[in-house]
Amino acid sequence: MSKFPIDLDFSHVDLSSLETEEDVRLEAKKLLPAALVLLGEAVALQTWEELQKNFSGKSSQAEKRKFIQQTGKNYQRSASNREKQELEDHIVEQLRQLL
């Protein structure tokens, strides 16, 4: 299982334009912001589910969706340089596998 529990969408990437390592890196940098949000949302979903196990009250789908979206955006803004680099490297590896 991947360290990153996200499923990136590469359908809009023109793989034929990725001819060099630099091309692959540049594409990964373009995909990084959305990937950070997806990763933050994946962590938020796990957190939400854990909180609900310990919470006897009722929460709405709207509250859940808002929590996940906000957490995803917050993660995108607050991820460390190391986390960003590791995720970018992961994207590069995925792109290489598609080539």
Image (cartoon, rainbow, N blue to C red):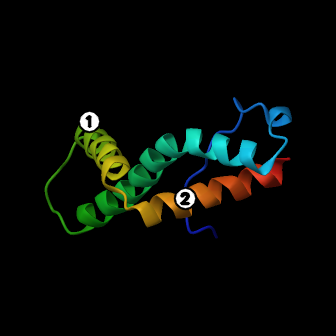
Q: Amino acid at mark 2?
A: Leu
Q: Earlier in the sequence, mark 1 or mark 2?
A: 1
Which of 82/61 is in front? 82
93 vs 28, left or right, is right
Secondary structure under tag 2 reads helix
Count of number-bearing discs = 2
Which of 41/55 is in front? 41
67 vs 1, left or right, is left
Residue 44's spot in the image, x, y percent?
A: 34, 55
Which of 52/36 is in front? 36
Residue 84's spot in the image, x, y percent?
A: 47, 57
Which of 81/10 is in front? 81
Q: Quadrant of the N terminus?
A: bottom right
Q: Is residue 83 above or below residue 72?
A: below
Q: Residue at x 37, y 62 (%)?
A: 80
The part of the image, by quadrant, that contains residue 61 is top left
Q: Residue at x 15, y 62 (%)?
A: 56
Q: To which residue does mark 2 refer?
A: 87
Residue 94's spot in the image, x, y percent?
A: 72, 54
Farthest residue in the left direction?
57
Q: Residues within 10 Å of mark 2 (few under 14, many from 20)?
A: many
Q: Residue at x 30, y 57 (%)?
A: 48
Q: To which residue does mark 1 refer?
A: 62
- Confirm whether residue 5 shows in the render: no
Q: Amino acid at mark 1?
A: Ala
